[in-house]
């Protein structure tokens, strides 16, 4: 989440001076390292001066960066040798000197050099190992992932470690083929293959996987000097906290696009096909569609902006290729296309146009439950176009959806913020004002211990919706989602339903552009997203680390993933400040009674009970060794498969919810000539109707609605804090 405060003048002057000098240099390898070191020093100074709670950049900090950068390159410790680490250990306490400019930047380029040498040696090694059959009748165990693993002491140990790793992966592929063979018809070619043939095919599958893995992850095109340096710098920023990031220019643009819910491109969905970038579908009305020169199935061979030389896209993943195809509004992109129809190759020039990301936009429909009309509003992100005053704003779109739902006569409202990563602080403040009268929305404190209350900035004291409301959350509801859920909980304005707690991101980031704008309108050297403030609920508690606890917990398989803020060792701590003064809402229902009824239903629900049991099993068997004996492995996998199949089937309702699509949405989405948009909305509607979590939430809302007639109308002003 971005702070709207102005950037400090000293930071702009500092980076302007450093980056101005960088722009004048050449492009050979030595100059690249010189530019990178100067950029590193500048970034280090800004982090120390501006971060909310910077760690001291000293020898201890250096040791942490040493270990974590090597881990980022080789997390499974299957590339470096122990001798490599010993060779690099001379830099273990000097990285802080490199950041401060007291020593030349040597650790990162030296580590990359050794790493690339080892990568080059691996291909013939795993090819050799996979050239011979594995014996899966022996009793042996394999540890897939463990923090206790160490680097191989020599090439012999490395080869043995790779042999075990490849045997395990082959076993997985072999088991899949055997399972497919068991289900195949007698006439299918698969049913006629011997087990030895399937084992050989499994080894070929693993070999192809590693060929693709190393070619894509460590290809000089995709893991170039910029990406290597970015990985190193982000090891440093993430040691300060998980949300401070250095973004190279293309990543900076992608971040802005996600925040604004729009981008400028050709108007086509892309996919990878046999190692090439293919057009999956052309979006009606977009630049590609208008040109009449690009069709579904065409291959994009090369790309360039303006008159720049065409760049070969072979070897790039779709996520990377997209960065080059998108660009500044109105700019020209040239694509070398291989036609699917006849294989001819031609170069097409297009003007980049705005493409709206409908998938992330606010959407709503009506759930018909027990003679009630319940409004369901999905908000995947708190998006905001900061570069265009007339651009998309999540708060504006949410207001439109609420007005539509009210006009349709809803009795209650569910706002789904599951897996919403956050976004615009201004928009979440405005949204809070839709449901409570004027008052504090969230508290913010900076590194100087200066705190302030951010008031909801709804344009009117009148609330937009005053009926019963539920907010749905899960482990990946973060930042702005947590601010909204916390405010609704503290005001007693809504019941929070979902996982035991939300993600736990209670920090504020500001964005520092680095350098002058380039041809795509992005800063020449990207940007720095830096944590500068911390969020606090209006009751005084931070949302950091602890998140927001649900009033009603719905068991969720994501609980066992352990990927919340509290699971990150560099996360900032939880603390508390003085509460704000605010007025609690008096709901027209007995919340304790509603919660008790829901908990009783959940305890008796076989789907949720099964998920609870799966989570218990996952916790108990985390990082357990795996048998490399085929018979034992298949027995274990069958037990696991049955357990997860039961959960997967359970969360999809056999009897879908009754859903009503409002007429205006039916015309906008389901009758849209753009098939991709119509298909997306149709799939979303189906997913909503089959979601067991939404079903239970609708039942909770029905309880809230049914109690209203026994209570006076809802109001504020009865209890103050």
Image (tube, helix red, strand yellow):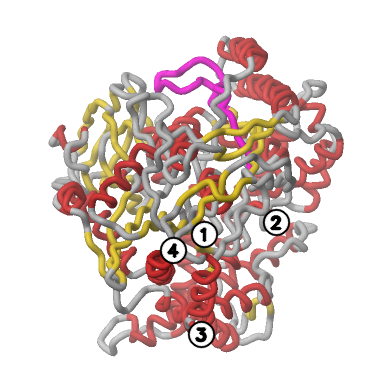
Of callouts 2 and 1, the N-terminal one: 2
Q: Distance between the residues labelled 2 and 1?
A: 42 Å
**The stretch drawn in magenta includes residue 54:** no
Image mark for residue 638: 3
Residue 177: image quadrant is bottom left
Q: Distance between the residues labelled 2 and 3?
A: 30 Å
- Residue 482 visible within the image: no
Image mark for residue 711: 4
Residue located at (49% from left, 31% from top) = 252
Residue 132: image quadrant is bottom right
Q: Mark 1 points at which residue?
A: 496
Q: Name the residue under label 2.
A: 77
Residue located at (83% from left, 42% from top) = 89
- Please tell me whether mark 1 sits on a helix, a strand or a loop: strand
Q: Position of residue 703 (x, y in %)?
A: 42, 70
**Vertical arrangement, residue 193 with respect to residue 22, above or below:** below
Which numbered disc, 1 or 3, marks the residue closer to the eye? 1
Of callouts 2 and 3, the N-terminal one: 2
Range drawn in magenta: 506-527
């Amino acid at each position: 989440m971005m702070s709207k405060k102005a950037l400090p003048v000293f930071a702009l002057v500092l980076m302007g001076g450093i980056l101005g000098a960088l722009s004048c240099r050449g492009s050979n390898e030595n100059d690249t390292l010189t530019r990178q070191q100067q950029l590193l020093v500048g970034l280090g100074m800004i982090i120390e001066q501006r971060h909310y709670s910077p760690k001291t950049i000293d020898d201890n900090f250096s040791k942490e960066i040493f270990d974590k950068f090597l881990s980022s390159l080789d997390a499974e410790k299957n590339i470096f040798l122990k001798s490599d680490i010993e060779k690099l250990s001379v830099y273990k306490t000097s990285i802080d000197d490199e950041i401060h400019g007291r020593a030349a930047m040597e650790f990162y380029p030296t580590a990359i050099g050794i790493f690339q040498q080892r990568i080059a040696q691996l291909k013939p090694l795993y090819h050799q190992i996979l050239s011979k059959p594995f014996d899966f009748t022996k009793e042996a165990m394999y540890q897939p992932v463990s923090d206790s693993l160490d680097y191989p002491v020599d090439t012999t140990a490395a080869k043995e470690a790779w042999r075990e790793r490849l045997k395990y992966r082959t076993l997985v592929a072999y088991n899949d083929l055997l399972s497919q063979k068991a289900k195949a018809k007698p006439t299918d070619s698969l049913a006629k293959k011997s087990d030895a043939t399937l084992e050989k095919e499994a080894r070929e599958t693993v070999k192809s996987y590693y060929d693709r893995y190393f070619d894509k992850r460590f290809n000089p095109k995709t893991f170039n000097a910029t990406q290597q340096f970015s990985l190193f710098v982000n090891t440093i920023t993430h040691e300060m906290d998980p949300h401070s990031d250095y973004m190279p220019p293309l990543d900076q643009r992608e971040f802005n696009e996600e925040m604004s819910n729009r981008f400028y491109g050709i108007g086509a969905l892309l996919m990878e096909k046999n190692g090439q970038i293919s057009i999956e579908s052309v979006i009606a009305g977009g630049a590609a569609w208008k040109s009449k020169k690009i069709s579904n199935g065409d291959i994009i061979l090369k790309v360039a902006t303006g008159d720049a030389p065409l760049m070969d896209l072979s070897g790039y993943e779709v996520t990377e290729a997209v960065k080059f195809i998108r660009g500044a509004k109105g700019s020209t992109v040239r694509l070398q296309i291989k036609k699917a129809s006849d294989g001819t190759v031609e170069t097409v020039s297009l003007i980049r146009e705005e493409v709206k990301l409908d998938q992330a936009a606010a959407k709503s429909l009506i759930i018909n439950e027990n003679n009630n009309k319940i409004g369901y509003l999905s908000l995947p992100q708190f998006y905001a176009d900061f570069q265009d005053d007339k651009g998309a704003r999540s708060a504006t779109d949410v207001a439109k959806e609420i007005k539509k739902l009210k006009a349709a006569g809803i009795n209650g409202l569910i706002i789904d913020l599951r897996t919403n990563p956050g976004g615009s602080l201004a928009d979440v403040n405005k949204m809070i004002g839709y449901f409570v009268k004027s008052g504090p929305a969230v508290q913010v404190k900076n590194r100087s211990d200066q705190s302030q209350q951010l008031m909801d900035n709804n344009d009117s004291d009148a609330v937009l919706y005053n009926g019963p409301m539920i907010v749905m959350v899960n482990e990946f509801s973060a930042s702005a989602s947590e601010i909204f859920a916390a405010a609704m909980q503290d005001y007693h304005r809504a019941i929070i339903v979902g996982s035991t707690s939300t993600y736990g991101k209670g920090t504020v980031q500001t964005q520092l552009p680095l350098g002058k704008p380039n041809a795509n309108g992005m800063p020449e050297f990207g940007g720095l997203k830096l944590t500068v403030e911390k969020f606090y609920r209006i009751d005084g508690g931070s949302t950091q680390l602890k998140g927001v606890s649900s009033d009603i917990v719905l068991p969720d398989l994501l609980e066992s993933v352990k990927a919340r803020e509290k699971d990150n060792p560099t996360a900032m701590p939880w603390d508390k400040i003085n509460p704000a003064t605010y007025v609690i809402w008096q709901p027209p229902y007995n919340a304790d009674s509603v919660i008790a009824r829901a908990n009783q239903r959940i305890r008796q629900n076989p789907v949720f009970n099964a998920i609870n049991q799966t989570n218990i099993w996952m916790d108990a068997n985390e990082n357990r060794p795996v048998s490399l004996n085929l018979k034992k492995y298949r027995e274990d996998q069958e037990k696991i498969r049955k357990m997860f199949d039961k959960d997967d089937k359970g969360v999809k309702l056999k009897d879908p919810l009754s859903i009503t699509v409002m007429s205006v949405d039916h015309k906008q989405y389901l009758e849209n000539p753009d098939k991709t948009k119509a298909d997306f909305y149709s799939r979303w509607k189906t997913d909503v109707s089959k979601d067991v979590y939404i079903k239970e939430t609708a039942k909770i809302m029905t309880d809230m609605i049914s109690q209203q007639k026994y209570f006076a109308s809802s109001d504020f002003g009865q209890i103050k804090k």
